[in-house]
Amino acid sequence: MNDAADREERESDDAAQQALARDILARDRRHVWHPFTQHGTEAEPRLIAGARGASLYDAEGREILDLISSWWTCTHGHSHPALNQALAGQVARFEHVMFAGFTHQPAVDLASALSQLLPGDLARVFFSDDGSTSVEVALKIAYQYWANRGEGRRRVFISFDGGYHGDTLGAMSLGRGSGFFNLFRNMMCQVAVLPFPYTFEGDDAAEDREKGALTALEDRLSNGTHDVAALIVEPMLQGAGGMRMCRAEFLKRLVEIAQSIGVLVIFDEVATGFGRTGTLFAMQQAGVVPDLVCLSKGLTSGYMPMAVTVVRDKVFEAFLGDDFDRALPHGHSFTANPLACAVALRSLMLFAEEDTLGRIARIGARHRAMLSELSRREDVVRPRLLGSILAFDLKGEAGYQSAQSQALKVWFLAHGLNIRPLGSTIYLMPPYCITDEELARAYAGLIEGLDWLAANRP
Ligand SMILES: Cc1ncc(COP(=O)(O)O)c(C=O)c1O
């Protein structure tokens, strides 16, 4: 084929691709309802046609660095060859089978591996589909645990101001302190909300805040009514509430107080699990063992929707008996989906094979250097860092729909960076495979974006 014919063929391929992209976007506009989206005002979504490593590629081939790991799910990187292979291998064997009255090796292998990695006797795994359902399951288990033990008056849950646990009804109730769900207040179950002692670099009031939170807990627990079923907390890091970090000392004390009077402790590690905070699980930093833990997001490295609620033996044992009344009446069609289990298992193996915790430590060290630069800026407050997460707040801004951060989000995307601020909080939470060159690009874009904002305040 000569050059002219070659060029003509390429141009006609490009034209066909562009027509296809236009058609997909038109049908998206007509038929799709996107999450957390005001369709009345928001710009058209970016059409993604590929993803590899730390990057997404849109339909026109433009690269976008995925600096929030596709809603914190993607740990080892997009389209990882080992995970692709694990998925393909399982597809060739069997794709799905109901999980009551049947079992399969991928689920049993994954449950065994998780219970070996988790501390203490967190050894019984209940499978579900996403972060919200894993929390919903934890809530129901805690509630029924007390009913099965003849203490059905324990119906109140304790959670934290700014905590977020998902969007289903029970999870919304636990996350009422996030302020996202005020409209649904009348549908919620009983939850007492405590202050969360967040902290940041250079903070000298952390201990006072912690004392306040622990006193509030003790006050709530010592009112003599013994009506509390469980306490739920996002250990070390409140994610959606604004990447608010707390100290391990606080977490340790919190668990000691609750467990000392028998209140069940639920750790929501949906966001913090699988390395995000620098250790495989955030709970390891405080050296405590909760009674229940919720995991999702990074469980399958973002490949498949799956979650687990893992409980200590004593919790499981409270559901044993001679009739179904004591059993947990809960399950989903896709519980323990074998494809998801196979990918999750392979993802766990990658942590050792690729020295993933070492990679996270290297990302943390680079973040630290960036944090010092950010700390010197006038427009940055509360700089903070934990594991692979760098975060700070824009000075003088508040509210989930902060105009400045919305403007920044658009600027970042136009400059090839997927950074979605949470209100006035800007953060980076990249996939662990991100290279030094990509991180340097991310930091340069971050600084350039802040400079642009300073010069063009909306
Ligand atoms: C701590 C925490 N729990 C639960 C959830 C809900 O997970 P999902 O969106 O998968 O339902 C999230 C989601 O961001 C989360 O951060």
Image (cartoon, helix red, strand yellow):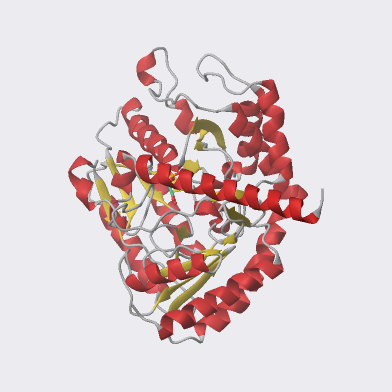
Residue 158 coordinates in the image, percent (x, y): 31, 49
Q: Is residue 74 visible?
A: no
Q: Residue furthest right?
A: 1
- Which quarter shows the C terminus? bottom left
Query: Could you say which is closer to the camera, residue 408 or residue 429?
Result: 408
Residue 186 image-quadrant placement: top left
Residue 208 coordinates in the image, percent (x, y): 37, 73
Residue at (53, 74) in percent of width and height: 446
Residue at (63, 38) in percent of width and height: 344
Residue 328 image-quadrant placement: top left
In the rendered image, the vertical position of residue 209 relative to residue 126, given as above or below: below
Residue at (70, 68) in percent of width and height: 436
Residue 316 coordinates in the image, percent (x, y): 47, 29
Residue at (30, 39) in percent of width and height: 169
The reply, left or right, for residue 49 in relation to residue 206 is right
Q: Is residue 425 visible?
A: yes
In the rendered image, the vertical position of residue 451 relative to residue 343, given as above or below: below
Residue 418 coordinates in the image, percent (x, y): 52, 62
In the rendered image, the vertical position of residue 212 relative to residue 145, given as above or below: below
